[in-house]
Image: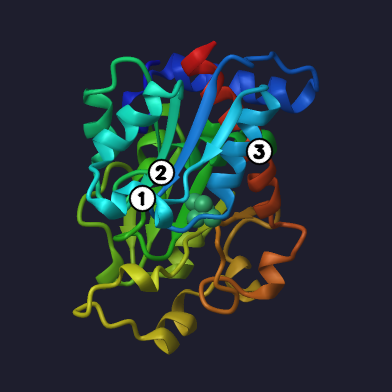
């Protein structure tokens, strides 16, 4: 792989290689050293998990890490992001982890990247491929028979880059059934894989894995008035809602969580919740992704 931009770019072999390496990193604490490489984090949107996870992943592999402070960078003086990348590459940076509101920007930047690698850490509503891969790692760890799994994704599917990437990934790896649960205004405009329903009981019925999405109030257009009490009444993942899923179902959330809105405290903190395992696995999966680009 030259760049890590979207799930659709990955072959089945790439996906299995990333899974194998991420589990190896989790199980073996002797990591290869890539000390002559430098990674830069360029986050034009807020992040806690993804930015820190890429930084720790890079440091575990002995890379140097630069976190560009966008607020004080020379882009505020009119420099283009292309020139920022070229400038940093001239200083010897080899990998750029980019999160940006503009959909497709990482791919556009990759088209001109001769001597460095671009990693998409989330572009608008389009894709969040490293999140999807760490979610897959977590599912495989807990429920290895993907061809027997029913997975439900619940919430704001229309604005979710995570849901887009997960649909492509679940289709690629042969998940048995995927249900996309959302009120009509949040149903996806394009479905890549799965069946859409507005009924939470129907969507959760017999599910092995329940993935809860954040209510992304910052992405809602003015026309998409959010009736929060209605959403909470019909779609919050509560203990009662989880009764529709299998008794041993796991609950996932990419974070950050809005407790009491899309997920109840009792579920987020229950033994069924693997949300913090997702966070831990994110480091190992991102180590595998970085290694696959430079190793
Ligand atoms: N899941 C995720 O992308 O979290 P952050 O916004 O904290 O990076």
- Left or right of residue 13: residue 17: right
97 or 243, nearer to the observer? 97
Q: Who's the residue at 66% across and 73% down the image?
A: 239
102 or 91, nearer to the observer? 91
179 or 41, nearer to the observer? 41
For ligand 1, tell me if the residue under mark 2 lies within 8 Å. yes
In terms of image quadrants, where is residue 282?
Answer: top right
The label on residue 128 is 2
- Left or right of residue 166: residue 138: right
Can you identify the residue that label 1 sits on?
Answer: 161
For ligand 1, tell me if the residue under mark 1 lies within 8 Å. no
Real-space Cα separation, disc 2 to disc 1, in angstroms: 6 Å
Q: Is disc 2 surrounded by few (<14), some (14 to 19) or many (20+) residues within 10 Å? A: many
- What is the quadrant of the N terminus in the image? top left
Q: Who's the residue at 22% across and 80% down the image?
A: 222
**What is the x, y in percent for residue 57?**
63, 32
Real-space Cα separation, disc 2 to disc 3, in angstroms: 15 Å
Can you identify the residue that label 3 sits on?
Answer: 281
Real-space Cα separation, disc 3 to disc 1, in angstroms: 19 Å
Describe the element under mark 3 as helix, strand or loop: helix
């Amino acid at each position: 792989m030259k760049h890590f931009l979207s799930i659709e770019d990955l072959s089945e072999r790439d996906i299995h290689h990333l899974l194998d390496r991420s589990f190896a990193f989790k199980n073996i604490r002797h990591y290869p050293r890539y000390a002559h490489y430098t990674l830069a984090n360029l986050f034009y949107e807020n992040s806690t998990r993804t930015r820190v996870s890429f930084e720790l992943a890079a440091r575990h592999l002995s890379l140097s890490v630069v976190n560009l402070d966008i607020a004080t960078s020379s882009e505020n003086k009119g420099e283009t992001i292309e020139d920022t990348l070229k400038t940093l590459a001239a200083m010897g940076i080899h990998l750029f982890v980019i999160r940006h509101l503009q959909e497709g920007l990482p791919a556009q930047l990759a088209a001109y990247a001769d001597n460095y690698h671009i990693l998409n850490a989330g572009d608008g509503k389009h894709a969040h491929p490293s999140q999807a891969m760490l979610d897959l790692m977590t599912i495989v760890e807990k429920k290895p028979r993907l061809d027997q799994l029913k997975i439900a994704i619940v919430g704001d599917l229309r604005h979710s880059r995570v849901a887009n990437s997960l649909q492509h990934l679940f289709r690629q790896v042969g998940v048995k059934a995927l249900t996309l649960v959302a009120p009509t205004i949040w149903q996806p405009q394009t479905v890549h894989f799965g069946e859409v329903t507005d009924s939470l009981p129907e969507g959760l019925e017999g599910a092995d894995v329940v993935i809860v999405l954040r209510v992304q109030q910052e992405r809602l257009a003015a026309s998409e008035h959010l009736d929060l009490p209605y959403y909470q009444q019909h779609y919050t993942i509560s203990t009662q809602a989880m009764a529709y899923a299998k008794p041993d179902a796991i609950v996932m959330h990419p974070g950050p969580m809005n407790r009491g809105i899309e997920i109840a405290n009792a579920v987020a903190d229950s033994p069924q919740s693997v949300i913090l395992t997702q966070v831990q696995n994110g480091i190992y999966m991102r180590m595998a992704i970085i290694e696959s680009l430079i190793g």
